Amino acid sequence: MVNAFSCLIKKKVTGNLPLKDDEIEQIGREIEAEIDARFGRSLAVRELDAGSDNAAEIEINNLNNAYYDVERFGISFVASPRHADVLLVTGAITHNMAIAAQKTYDAMPSPKFVVAVGDDACDGGIYRGTYAVLGGADALLPVDLKIPGNPPTPLQILTGLLALMRTAAKKG
């Protein structure tokens, strides 16, 4: 039987893990500064799965875990497109999702940005040219940024969002 007291005094398994990743911190602080300047302290993101294999969604969900914690940089994921500034599209646009994807985009207030995340959303990926797929997100929506990868890492997604903020600053 395990003694509760022994669990308190023995060495912890997570004791050797680093508390911070300097590259994530640097990119996060740059994103935070851009968001403060352009969007008034927060960037609302709506994620849309248009027909993916869930690989990119797992990496996007990792952005909200305790390691990356993008909320501290001012990025929040919202449930409604009516509250979103950025639409993250994952997966190739399937015929079944085309109307829903268009309605989601139309429901967003202006200014709005569309980011294709993953190879499937960028150009259709392995599903390109199949009977059930229209193509990448740009086959239906005006894509502002493409983040390739199968799937892209959370760091690549953050770097892409930083590039989007800088592009928005130049346009505005």
Image (spheres, rainbow, N blue to C red):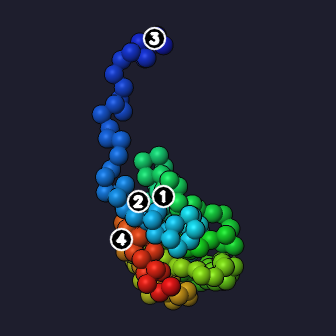
Of marks 1 and 3, the one in the foreground: 1
First-in-chain label (4 vs 3): 3
Which numbered dot is residue 73? 1
Q: Residue 22 location, x and y as percent? A: 31, 52
Q: Residues within 10 Å of mark 2 (few under 14, many from 20)?
A: some
Q: In this view of the protein, which residue sits in the foreground, 167 or 49?
A: 167
First-in-chain label (3 vs 2): 3
Is residue 159 rendered to the left or right of residue 4?
left
Image marks 3 and 2: residues in contact by CB distance under 8 Å? no
Q: Residue at (57%, 64%) from the top-left corner?
A: 42
Q: Residues within 10 Å of mark 3 (few under 14, many from 20)?
A: few
The span from disc 1 to disc 4 (Cα, nearest Å) is 23 Å
Of marks 1 and 4, the one in the foreground: 1
Q: In this view of the protein, which residue sits in the foreground, 107 or 93?
A: 107
Can I make out residue 108 in this image?
Answer: yes
- State whether residue 30 is above or below residue 12: below
Residue 45 found in image quarter: bottom right
Of marks 4 and 3, the one in the foreground: 3
Secondary structure of the residue carrying tag 4 is loop
The span from disc 2 to disc 4 (Cα, nearest Å) is 24 Å
Q: Residue 151 location, x and y as percent? A: 39, 66
Q: Residue at (59%, 73%) from the top-left corner?
A: 85
- Can you identify the residue that label 4 sits on? 149
- Can you identify the residue that label 2 sits on? 29
Q: Residue at (50%, 53%) from the top-left corner?
A: 72
Q: Amino acid at mark 3?
A: Phe
Q: Amino acid at mark 4?
A: Gly
Of marks 3 and 2, the one in the foreground: 2
- State whether residue 65 is above or below residue 45: above
- Can you identify the residue that label 3 sits on? 5
Image marks 2 and 1: residues in contact by CB distance under 8 Å? yes
